[in-house]
Amino acid sequence: MSIHGSFIHGDNFKCGENVIIEEDVVVGDDVKLGHNVTLKSGTRILNDVTLADYVKTTGICIIGNGVGARTGACISKSVIINDNAFIGPEVMTNHTKNVMHKRNLKEVQLITRIGYGAVIGSDSSLVAGLTIGDNVVIAAGSNVYKDILEPGIYGGNPIRKIKDVDPDYILKKPEGYRDYEFDIELLRKYLPKWTGF
């Protein structure tokens, strides 16, 4: 286990074995980490969050209240997950659209947003810079390469709407709820090549 001295956590924090928590990580109340979880610098986790075994963050991200992430999910830097979303096992989010390795290209960092009550199914992959809307359900094994804003169940390759979501399945946002955004100083520190400055 390796937990940096700067780590801040709220009440009722629980942590499995072989967890790595880097500098400048903050988590709220009632957060539970499974075994072999890695939280990289800039990670912000709110309250009532469960990260299962082998979940990792790769840098600056926001994981909202009531979020669950299952075994092996990768929450890349520059990802914002709003409240009550679910991230399935082995989900991969990405933080850049261009592979820079050995290439003379201008790096662009993008922000991916996952909406309130959204569900990302097992083994799905999201390209960088997407917006997944509130109560959108992504079926297992999907490759998501475009914004999906309207509630519904989406899947396949290429991804398409399969059917509407049952109205009883919709989680309603509390009145006055505001989607999360990164603090500008965190962006300057961890995403200096973000295009929105």
Image (cartoon, rainbow, N blue to C red):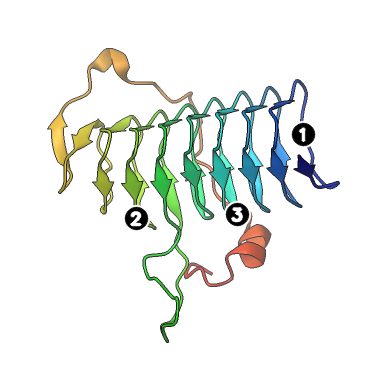
| Residue at the image position 34 percent from the left and 43 percent from the top | 132
Q: Which residue is mark 3?
A: 59
Per the rendering, the mark at residue 9 is: 1
The kind of residue on which mark 2 rests is Val
**Percent of width and height locating residue 169:** 31, 17
**Percent of width and height locating residue 172:** 39, 22
Of residues 121 and 192, which is closer to you in this image? 121
Q: Assess whether mark 1 and mark 2 are in contact (beta carbons under 8 angstroms).
A: no
| Cα distance in 3D space between marks 1 and 3 | 17 Å
Residue 88 sits above or below residue 3 on the image: above
- Disc nearer the start of the sequence (1/3): 1
| Cα distance in 3D space between marks 2 and 3 | 16 Å
Q: Quadrant of residue 46?
A: top right
- Disc nearer the start of the sequence (2/1): 1
Per the rendering, the mark at residue 127 is: 2
**Percent of width and height locating residue 15:** 71, 28
Residue 153 appears left or right of 17: left
| Residue at the image position 22 percent from the left and 23 percent from the top | 165
| Residue at the image position 50 percent from the left and 51 percent from the top | 76
- Disc nearer the start of the sequence (2/3): 3
